[in-house]
């Protein structure tokens, strides 16, 4: 992992996301890219100098935002990092997507809040869209997460398709964080079960003979409910899911289920696509 991108909004809600980004950049030696985006606010009342008022507001806001970014830069330099700072005008989703491509970003980190804030609106729609659009992992960190770093990872799988390539990258990622990985699986009556769980676990064990690979399973009325229970049982501080076709995440990320699981998850959630962590 060489480049990490984190979006900030200068509130305490985004501080845990920034701290997670600092931790991961320090552990991996990656370059940390810090992004703040903003949209123009147009006057609600008509004035003769309407457009100039808007331009003046944008200039004032941009100067203020740049000052705050400069303060963050000095803070991170004091912690041994040399971050790249970006202040962009535009919706955060498209800006993030463009930066992933133009700056070879390996991991995107977003904050998450249930309150009325920039990141609250972002998470409900933009983050879900980014999961579909990005070719790199996306880490979402709740505002309530106070821990620095990760030690116990829970990887949620449906045990229906080969996922050894995902686990290969996840194990590597966990190793340089000093974290353990526990595979978890929810068995819900309404969820299909086509392939043998044991066969797929044997495939995983054969691929990683040096790992003590086990699966912790739970019967539940819903996948979301079962995952929450397993996260509590494992004391996990990071939930990981993959987004390739027809897997667990494909089933949970829809307008009704994504908010129920992701918006209220007490721990950070890492979703990564077929593209690998490196």
Image: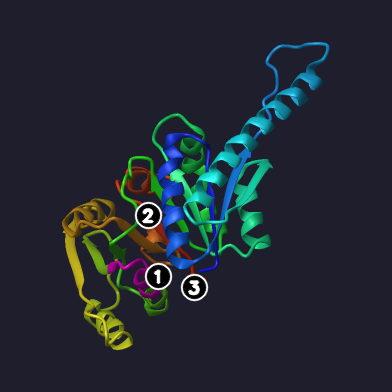
The mark closer to the camera, 2 or 1, is 1
Q: Nearer the viewer, residue 41 or 131?
A: 41
Residue at position x 30%, y 72% in the image = 159
Using a 10 Å C-alpha cutoff, classify the residue at mark 3 as few (fewer than 14 neighbours), some (14 to 19) or many (20 or more).
Answer: few
Label ID, residue 173: 1
Report the magenta stretch's main SS: helix
Label 2 packing within 10 angstroms: few (<14), some (14-19), many (20+): many
Q: Mark 3–mark 1 contact, CB under 8 Å? A: no
At which x and y percent is residue 249? 39, 60
Where 41 falls versus 78 (above or below)?
above
Front one among 95 and 25: 25
Q: Position of residue 34 (x, y in %)?
A: 57, 49
At a point 45% along the width and 61% down the height, the residue shown is 26
Side of 118 relative to 12 (left or right): right
Snapshot quadrant of residue 217: bottom left
Q: What range is drawn magenta here? A: 171-180
Residue assigned mark 2: 269
- Taking the magenta stretch, the answer to whether it contains residue 194 is no
**Height in image: 206 above or below 64?**
below
Q: Secondary structure at mark 3?
A: loop
Q: Is residue 177 magenta?
A: yes
Percent x, y of residue 231: 23, 56
- Residue at figure coordinates x 52%, y 34% from the top left: 118
């Amino acid at each position: 992992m060489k480049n990490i991108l984190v979006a900030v909004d200068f509130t305490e809600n985004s501080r845990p996301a920034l701290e997670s980004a600092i931790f991961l950049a320090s552990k991996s030696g990656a370059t940390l890219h810090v992004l703040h985006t903003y949209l123009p606010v147009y006057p609600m009342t008509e004035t003769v100098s309407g457009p100039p008022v808007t331009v003046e507001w944008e200039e004032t806001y941009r100067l203020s935002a740049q000052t705050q970014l400069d303060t963050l830069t000095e803070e991170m330099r004091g912690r041994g990092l040399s971050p790249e700072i970006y202040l962009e005008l535009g919706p955060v989703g498209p800006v993030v997507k463009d930066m992933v491509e133009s700056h070879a970003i390996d991991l995107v980190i977003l904050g998450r809040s249930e309150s009325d804030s920039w990141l609250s609106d972002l998470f409900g729609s933009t983050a879900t869209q980014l999961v579909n659009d990005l070719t790199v992992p996306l880490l979402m960190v709740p505002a309530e997460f106070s821990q620095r770093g990760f030690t116990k990872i829970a990887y949620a799988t449906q045990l229906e398709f080969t996922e050894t390539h995902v686990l290969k990258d996840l194990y590597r990622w966990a190793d340089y964080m000093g974290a353990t990985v526990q595979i978890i699986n929810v068995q819900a009556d309404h969820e299909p079960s086509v392939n043998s769980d044991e066969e797929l676990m044997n495939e995983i064990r054969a691929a990683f003979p040096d790992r003590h690979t086990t699966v912790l399973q739970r019967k539940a009325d819903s996948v979301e409910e079962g995952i929450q229970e397993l996260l509590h049982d494992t004391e996990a501080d990071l939930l990981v899911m993959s987004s390739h076709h027809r897997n667990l995440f494909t089933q949970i990320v829809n307008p009704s289920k994504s908010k129920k699981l992701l918006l209220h998850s007490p721990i950070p959630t890492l979703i990564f696509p077929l593209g690998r962590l490196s």
